[in-house]
């Protein structure tokens, strides 16, 4: 029992330090948003003990590897109120849940084919009071809606992902960044990008995450923007 308690005290201290890191990178957060980010760690720790949606050994780096990584998209684009975003293959809710906290006036539709993961997403969103999140168990290619942006964290080969989702992007852009896919991926994907560029009416831009964050973890990661 003492070992168990010690572990959780250490874990909560780590989470406290990591949320401070997030607040440093996003200084304009409201008190409500700060509270929601602080709740994320304990919520996912609890749900992860019931339904494994995050590697248990990775929970020590939860805020760095999952939350801040997801929020990199918020460094590239400031989603305007009313923007519609689909998180395709959301898993346990990343990047959709952190982005929904960051952009409370945008609409997020989180989909995954695995029901237990969507159950976690729904419960976390409910606990946080996120009224701008809808979650559904459905394959991304079966979604019959259009969006301003589609976001994801490396769920599959980029070319396959683009073929499955790119036609769901509508043309009425209202941001500096053209409507399209925002894909969190590693740096070594030149072949995938080349194949995406060969698809009809696609353009690709890349943004290294080291441009936004100084931590070593981000040196090998980037956002890939696929647009028309």
Image (cartoon, helix red, strand yellow):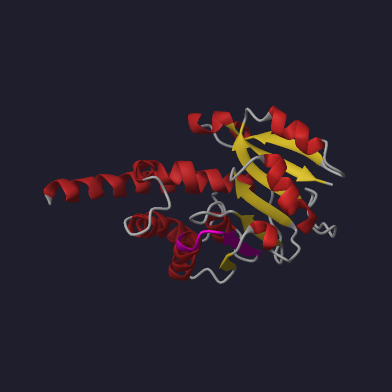
Q: In the image, residue 37 lies at what x, y percent?
A: 45, 56
In which quarter of the view is residue 90 placed? bottom right
Query: Does the image show residue 25?
Result: no
Question: Which sits in the foreground, 167 or 181?
Answer: 167
Apparent side of residue 159 relative to residue 152 in the rendered image (left or right): right
Q: What stretch is highlighted in magenta?
A: 106-116
**What residue do we see at 84% from left, 47% from top?**
228
**What residue do we see at 56% from left, 72% from top?**
131
In which quarter of the view is residue 75 placed? top right
Farthest residue to the left: give it: 2
Question: Which sits in the foreground, 191 or 205?
Answer: 191
Question: Which sits in the foreground, 81 or 85?
Answer: 85
Apparent side of residue 193 relative to residue 127 in the rendered image (left or right): right
Query: Does the image show residue 47?
Result: yes
Residue 192 lies within the magenta run: no
Farthest residue to the right: give it: 201
Query: Number of callouts in the render?
Result: 0
Question: Which sits in the foreground, 46 or 168?
Answer: 168
Q: In the image, residue 208 lies at what x, y percent?
A: 64, 33
Residue 107 lies within the magenta run: yes
Q: In the image, residue 133 lies at what x, y percent?
A: 57, 67
**What residue do we see at 49% from left, 32% from top?**
217
Q: In the image, residue 17 lies at what x, y percent?
A: 37, 44
Apparent side of residue 119 relative to residue 211 in the rendered image (left or right): left
**What residue do we see at 71% from left, 60% from top?**
80
Apparent side of residue 42 relative to residue 23 in the rendered image (left or right): left
């Amino acid at each position: 029992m003492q070992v168990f308690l010690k572990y959780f005290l250490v874990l909560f201290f780590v989470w406290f330090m990591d949320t401070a890191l997030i607040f440093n990178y996003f200084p304009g957060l409201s008190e409500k948003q700060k509270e929601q980010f602080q709740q994320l760690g304990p919520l996912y720790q609890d749900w992860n003990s019931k339904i494994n949606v995050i590697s248990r050994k990775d929970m020590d780096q939860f805020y760095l590897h999952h939350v801040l990584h997801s929020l990199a998209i918020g460094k590239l684009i400031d989603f305007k109120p009313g923007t519609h975003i689909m998180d395709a293959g959301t898993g346990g809710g990343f990047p959709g849940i952190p982005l929904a906290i960051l952009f409370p006036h945008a609409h997020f539709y989180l989909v995954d084919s695995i029901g237990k993961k969507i159950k976690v997403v729904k419960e976390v969103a409910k606990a946080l009071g996120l009224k701008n999140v809808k979650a559904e168990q459905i394959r991304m290619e079966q979604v019959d809606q259009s969006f301003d942006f589609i976001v994801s964290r490396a769920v599959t080969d980029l070319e396959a992902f683009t073929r499955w989702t790119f036609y769901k992007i509508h043309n009425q852009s209202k941001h500096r960044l053209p409507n399209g896919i925002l894909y969190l991926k590693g740096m070594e994907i030149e072949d995938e990008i080349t194949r995406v560029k060969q698809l009809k009416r696609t353009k690709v831009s890349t943004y290294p995450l080291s441009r936004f964050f100084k931590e070593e973890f981000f040196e090998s990661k980037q956002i890939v923007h696929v647009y028309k």
